[in-house]
Structure formats: structure tokens, C-alpha cells
Image (cartoon, grey):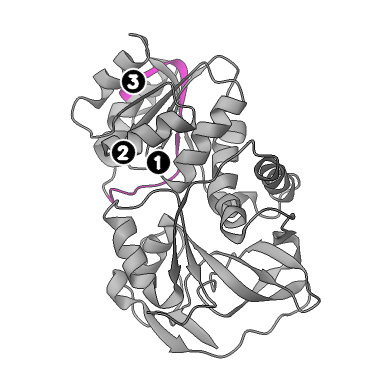
Amino acid sequence: MRAIQITEFGGPEVLHEAEVPDPVAGPGELLIRVDTAGVNYADTHTVENSYLTRSPLPMVPGGEVAGHTPDGRRVVALLPGNGGYAEQAVAPEQLAVDIPEGVTDAQALAVVVQGLTAWHLLRTSARLAPGESVVVHAAAGGTGSLAVQLAKAYGAGRIIATASSKDKRELALELGADIAIDGGPDGLKERLIEANGGSKVDVVLEMTGGPVFDASLAALAPFGRLVTYGMASRTPATPLQAAQLMGRSRSVVGFWLAHCVGRPGMYREPVAELLTMIGEGRLRPQLGGVHPLAEAARVHEDLRARRTIGKLVLDVTSSGA
């Protein structure tokens, strides 16, 4: 079958189209004829081997697919072991969810990793309470754009979006943010507090790392929670001491979606809720572009250069380059 494969770790340049053996479904697994594959920022870390887990080579990247099963079901699925950038993929049956009528492949793919992450950031990790202020960094991205909408739906008191350009900030406002500011690290703490009417903030959803993490932590109110779920800058934050958290009653919570897989109530139910919200028009995934499978390297380049907005997908049925 046709797939995007890597035989060495590195940047986008290591992504190449190749013919690879068809996967075989084992007990408890589904074989899926892939129509569309989702692209996530985490894929860029997987390809360069800088993610939380190490991957063997050769490897077909990609953690989510939408397509059809041999019996004709149209499903969206999470792939714990990668393999999504291909014409066929194998997924555990419990991680495949039927796509409702009226929901497109790209919309469904938006909820498998990014939507589910946004749901758990707010519900599970931050435990957002009605009326609390929420900072959503990278608010025009796949996860951020959904987090803004979900925070609104869950009763956030003030939603502060950050983004790197005027167009992205305008999008965040359209999606429900109360204010949108530049997300650059210089002066970020002060901008966050000013955006919250002069008060420190209750919740921050942070995936940049480095000085953005440091500034976000400094802007937290007592009993505030910073949820960290990525390190897009590839720069570590300043090491934390317990006294820094105790002294201001602040919390730092890490989140990794892999820990939700297999736990009752943490995958299928939130995914079904999000798909229902999309079908009813209460949640609008931002679709950043559909690209032929052969353009996977260019999509990764655009992601790393922060040139993208919303959900990016690969059309596996297209042979265009």
C-alpha cells in the first residue's frame, strides 16, 4: 500500500512516500481503509524522536484516521502505535467511533486528538468551574480553537486567547474569546493580567514551554492551575521548586492524551459528546486545509513554522503531489 514512511529521525525532510506492506488486523482490532488522515503537532515530535515515547524505525507516522471498515462502517479512530499516513490502518476496536451523518471526515478528525485533548484539559486537568478566567495559548490552532469554544460552553467567566498574528487573534474572538493578545513571551505576564482586568488568572492551557510557560505560571492567581500539554518551542521551562507552588497555592498539571486510552469514560464518551456538538452546530472545528498524502512533508514544515490555523488533514485517496 501507499504510505508516508520515515527510515531515519529528523525534520520534515525525512518524510517520504513509499510502498509498504498492508497491515493485518489482530484480535480486537479493526482494519480501516483510510480516506483521510489527521495531522497533529505531536507528529512533528514523533518524526524527530523528541516525543514522550520513542518510536521504532522504519515508521509510518500519524495517530488518527477516518475511513471505512470492511463491513461498510464509516469510522474515526485513534491509533496508539502511529500508522495513519497510509491507505490502510489498524486500530483497536474500542478506539474506533462511528461518524454521525452530517459530520465530515475532517470535522471528525478534529475531535480525536485535538478535541479530546481540549475536553480533558478543561474537564479533567483544570477542572474548570463556572466564572473562572481561562487563558488559551495558540488559540487559533487545532486544540486551542476548540478549547476556546468549549470553555465558553462550560461557563468560563473570561476567556483570554493568545495567538501570533492579527488574523489568528481575530479568529479567536470570532470563536468566543473575550479578548485576544499577542502570545510572545516578552511582557506576557503583564499582558495576561491586564487582559484579565488587572487580576491574575485562574486557568492557563499551555503548550509552548520555555519562557511562555514561565510567564504563564507567574500570571496565575492563588489556587490557579496551569495545564501543560506540549512544548512547541522545544525549549524547557525554568525548573520549578515546590516552594514556588506552595507560596502562592498554584498548581502545575501535566496532561498526555495517551493516559486516557483504555480508561472508562475517558475516550468514547467525550468523543461522542464532541461529535454530537458538531452535528448540532454547537462546536465548529476550524479546518486549516486538506492536502494530498504526498504533501505530508510540506504540511509538517507549515506546522513547525506556525503558518497554519485549525485542523490539517491528508487526503489519502488523492495521488496529487
Per the image, label 2 sits on a secondary structure element best described as helix
- Inspect the image, locate mark 2, and give the three-letter code of the amino acid beneath it: Asp
Q: Is residue 74 above or below residue 281?
A: below
Residue plotted at (52% across, 75% down): 316
Query: Residue 219 — which label?
Result: 3
- Cβ atoms under marks 3 and 2 closer than 8 Å: no
Q: Tell me which numbered mark, 3 or 2, is placed earlier along the sequence.
A: 2
Residue 1 in percent (x, y) is at: 55, 88
Location of residue 198 in the rendering, given as x and y in whole percent from the top left corner: 33, 8
Residue at 57% in and 33% down:
150
Type of the residue with mark 1: Ala
* Residue at x 78%, y 77% (from the top left corner): 27
What residue is shown with label 2? Answer: 167
Q: Earlier in the sequence, mark 1 or mark 2?
A: 1
Q: Which numbered disc flags the more N-terminal residue, 1 or 3?
A: 1
Q: Is residue 239 among what the camera can see?
A: no
**Residue found farthest to the right:** 71
- Mark nearest the camera among 1 and 2 is 2
Q: Which residues are magenta?
A: 218-234
The label number, if any, that marks residue 140 in the structure image: 1
Q: Residues within 10 Å of mark 1 (few under 14, many from 20)?
A: many
Q: Quadrant of residue 120?
A: top right
Q: Nearer the viewer, residue 89 or 223?
A: 89
Q: Residue furthest top?
A: 198
Is residue 40 visible in the rendered image? The answer is yes
Distance Cα–Cα, label 1 vs label 2: 9 Å
Give whichever of 315, 187 is nearer the camera. Answer: 315
Badge 1 vs badge 2, beta-carbon distance below 8 Å: yes
